Amino acid sequence: MSDNNIGTPRPELVEDIFALPVERHMLYFIQTDTDIIIIRILSQHQDAGRHLNWQ
């Protein structure tokens, strides 16, 4: 799955996280060799830095 070009890397939020716009939402996920793990789905108006800050 590492060759999958879906989503945009967002390392400034969390290491290895990707974002993908879906209608009026942003889907945040990480990829492993075999899976895509959805971390959070936020409205595009929500502050991703605030809601994804677990470092």
Image (spheres, rainbow, N blue to C red):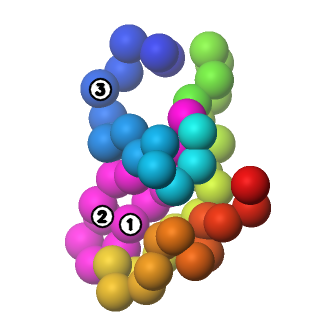
Say above or below: 28 vs 34: below
Residue 1 position within the rendered picture, expressed as x and y whole percent measured from the top left: 49, 17
The local crowd at label 1, few if under 14, some if 14 to 19, many if 20 or more residues have their Cα within 10 Å, is many
Three-letter code, disc 2: Val
The secondary structure type at the circle numbered 1 is: strand
The quarter of the picture where residue 31 lies is top right
Q: How far apart are marks 3 and 2 (CA)?
A: 15 Å
Res 30 visible: no
Residue 22 is labelled as: 2
Q: Residue at x 60, y 75 (%)?
A: 51
Mark 2 vs 1: CB contact within 8 A: yes
Q: Nearer the viewer, residue 34 or 45?
A: 45
Residue 9 position within the rendered picture, expressed as x and y whole percent measured from the top left: 38, 39
- Which-is-in-front pick, marks 2 and 1? 1
Q: Mark 1 points at which residue?
A: 26
Residue 21 position within the rendered picture, expressed as x and y whole percent measured from the top left: 29, 61
Residue 9 is labelled as: none
Three-letter code, disc 3: Asn
| Magenta residue span | 16-29
Q: Nearer the viewer, residue 22 or 54?
A: 54
Q: Name the residue under label 3.
A: 5
Q: Distance between the residues labelled 1 and 3?
A: 16 Å
